[in-house]
Amino acid sequence: MTPLTLTRFHRARLMQIWRSAGWPCKDALEIDLLAAQLVVLHTSPEGCETLRLTEEGIRTLAQARQRGARALSAHDRLGQKFAGHLLASGRIVWRELSLRAVIDGAVPEAPAPIPATSSPLWSEDTPARRTAANVWRMARPDLFSVRNTSVPAYLQPMVHEIKYSRADLLSDLRHDAKRQAYQWLCEECYYVFPAGIAEAGEIPEHFGIWVLHGGLDDGRFELLRPARHASCTLPFAVWMALCKATPLRGEDETAQAHLGEPGAGELPPADMP
């Protein structure tokens, strides 16, 4: 039998089975995984079928994770490090979301004048005409985060753009529309980069600045300048994107507390947002 060539789709399915209860989809990917003995089909006494990873399947996932960690660029490692900083401060963090945002566009040209002999059916200054002056574009912030709260007014959505090199930072600063999109999506927007690649005066004053002192493994972050705060209500489209995406999880954060652990069933204090 020809050995199975694993694709990223096979590895993604392995991870889905590992994270889930193992309910089978019974598609071609699962046939490949069963034939390669990376998963095994288990039937309960009640006749329910579930999939479980074999030792080889777990080893395959571990090897893929290690390869991915080695292949991370310096930009990605800086992003991961700062994401950990945000998680430690109690925020919910997403990476590289695709979000629709509004930027200012040119006002459309006025239509040709209507002859005096005819009366217009509607005013030229309509909400639709004013809305047309805006332009929609897709934004992909490196890090998007909100506070871990159930009170909408306390969410404080933030965007953090990661820039590891001076060339990447200067290129980003030339795209005003991109920065407008980030500001439309959040209340505060920051640039994060290693110390020394830029001066604070080179960054527009409404953006905050975090710098990394030291290396990617043992460096520490310093807030050079807080961002200008502007109140923002998250649009419904952004809420939908957050619902469909998976937030990051800290290395020391358990997916689920074990029953019986101290504090596992306790409610938060009444005054906690």
Image: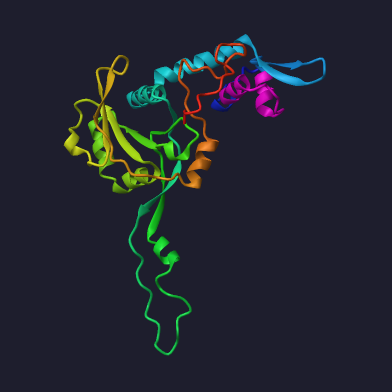
In the displayed structure, would residue 119 be above or below residue 192?
Answer: below
Magenta span: predominant SS is helix
Question: Which coloring applies here?
Answer: rainbow
Tell me: 175 left or right of 65: left
Which image quadrant is residue 83 in?
Answer: top left
Tell me: 34 left or right of 7: right
Q: Residue 51 magenta-drawn?
A: no
The percent position of residue 15, horizontal first and vertical second, equals: 58, 22
Quadrant housing the N terminus = top right
What residue sits 43% from the left and 65% below the top?
127
In the orientation shown, which residue stands out farthest toward the right?
46
What residue sits 72% from the left and 20% below the top?
50
Foreground residue among 208 and 22: 208
Foreground residue among 72 and 161: 161
In the orientation shown, which residue stands out farthest toward the top?
55
What residue sits 48% from the left and 23% below the top?
249
The percent position of residue 11, horizontal first and vertical second, equals: 56, 22
The percent position of residue 186, horizontal first and vertical second, equals: 38, 41
In the orientation shown, which residue stands out farthest toward the front?
270
The percent position of residue 39, horizontal first and vertical second, equals: 66, 16
Number of dots carrying numbers: 0
Foreground residue among 186 and 129: 186
Q: Which residues are magenta?
A: 11-34
In the displayed structure, would residue 1 be above or below residue 228?
Answer: above
Q: Residue 23 magenta-drawn?
A: yes
Which image quadrant is residue 261 in?
Answer: top right
Foreground residue among 245 and 66: 245
